[in-house]
Amino acid sequence: MTWEQLAKMSPEEIRDKGLFPYPTLPHPKHTPGGMVFPKMQIAMFPRLERFDVDYDLPEEFLPEFPPAMFLQNRPELGDVSRGQVITLNNFTALFNDILTPVQLDGLRLLLTPMPQEEFNATEDRKTVNASPGVACFDCHVNGHTTGQIELNPDMRPQQRRLRLDTPSIRGTYNFQLFGSKRSIRSLRDFAQFEQRTAYFNGDHIHAAKKGIVVLSPQQAAHMERLQAMLDFPPAPKLTVLGKLDPKKATQQELRGEKLFFGKAQCATCHPAPFYIDNFMHDLRVERFLSSEPPDGPVKTFSLRGIKDSPPYLHDGRLLTLEDTVEFFNLILELRLSQEEKTELVSFLRCL
């Protein structure tokens, strides 16, 4: 079977013959779920290691660690992390003269560990030693991601829940939806939701036992202020309107852009300049699979800086941008040629 042969088949044929190459990627510990961190991060922060599960993707398919951090109010500074993982130990030295007092306090809160279902001080924790919990920036390292995973917490008591690959929070000042399924409408709500509900699978009694920290509206607002400063990485080939500058782009990249806004239909859900439409879409992937129930609508993610955010799709099942193009070529029945797929990937690397 080749990609070209597969693309000529109907969804029903692919399903009946069991040929779909990108089934759902499950959580390696599906029943308890919880956060699982890649080994390169655990090597630096042993407190994040669980004794019941190991991370399941090779580091070669994960984002750079530690990721760079960019501020939309100080673009001239470039990577403000200076190649470091931002922690409670170094954040004031790095940002005292860059952020406002409110933003600095928001960063402090985002770096503060708080109890969570698997990481806490109770006897049923999933760590060898008692743990103060995890911080927002443990998953969103430097405001980005290094491929950490968890299970979507708000679909219980369903037996099957979505595996969630940690998304980047770069550029959230332009986002209107937060959480792949939750449709949370502000960063402030998201900060409170995570600690009150998500970290404990919506069980407030269990949360009280494990040590829930209830954030005040003012604290959540400070966290929101900091997150609104996080910017996408520089894209030197894009104009101010988010399109390729013909004087800087190659002919292959320009052909990829034409495909993106045309035949490949990518811009239907990912319009310029930020390549996000702030809607939720149902790809109906179950058309291609006989053994999986529907996932339903999932939030569109921004494609700005996408080359720095593997793996792809909400569960990380697409390890490369090439995989992502192959996936959508099948899902949308685009019939792209191999040359067109290569051109499309070339454009995506410019974003």
Image: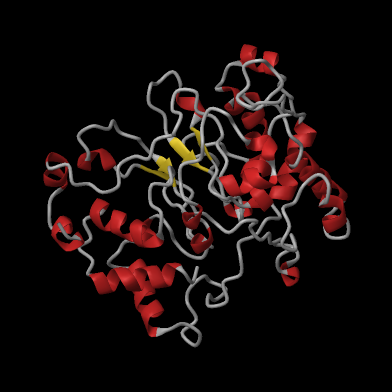
Residue at left offset 39%, top offset 35%: 26
Look at the image and name its color scheme: secondary structure
- Residue occupying the point 51% across, 28% down: 153
Q: In the rendering, at what x and y percent does residue 22 appear?
A: 30, 47
| Residue toward you, 97 or 37 | 37
Name the foreground residue: 236 vs 39.
39
Using the rendered view, name the quadrant where residue 94 is placed. Answer: bottom right
**Residue at the location (65% across, 27% down)?**
119
**Left or right of residue 344, residue 338 in this image:** left
Give the farthest residue toward the bottom.
247
The N terminus lies in which quarter of the figure? Answer: bottom left
Give the residue at x 51% y 40%. Answer: 55
Q: Is residue 108 above or below residue 213?
A: below
Is 99 left or right of 259, judged from the image as shown?
A: right
The answer to whether residue 115 is visible is yes
Using the image, determine if residue 102 lies above or below residue 250: above
Can you say whether 111 is above or below 210 in the image?
Answer: below
**Image mark count:** 0
Question: In screen coordinates, is 41 left or right of 317?
Answer: right
User: How far across and down, in percent of the image, does residue 29 sit?
Assistant: 46, 29
x, y (%) of residue 183?
Answer: 51, 37
Q: As drawn, is 39 to the left or to the right of 181?
A: right
Residue 188 appearing in the image:
no
Q: Quadrant of residue 348?
A: bottom left
Rendered location of residue 90, percent (x, y): 83, 51
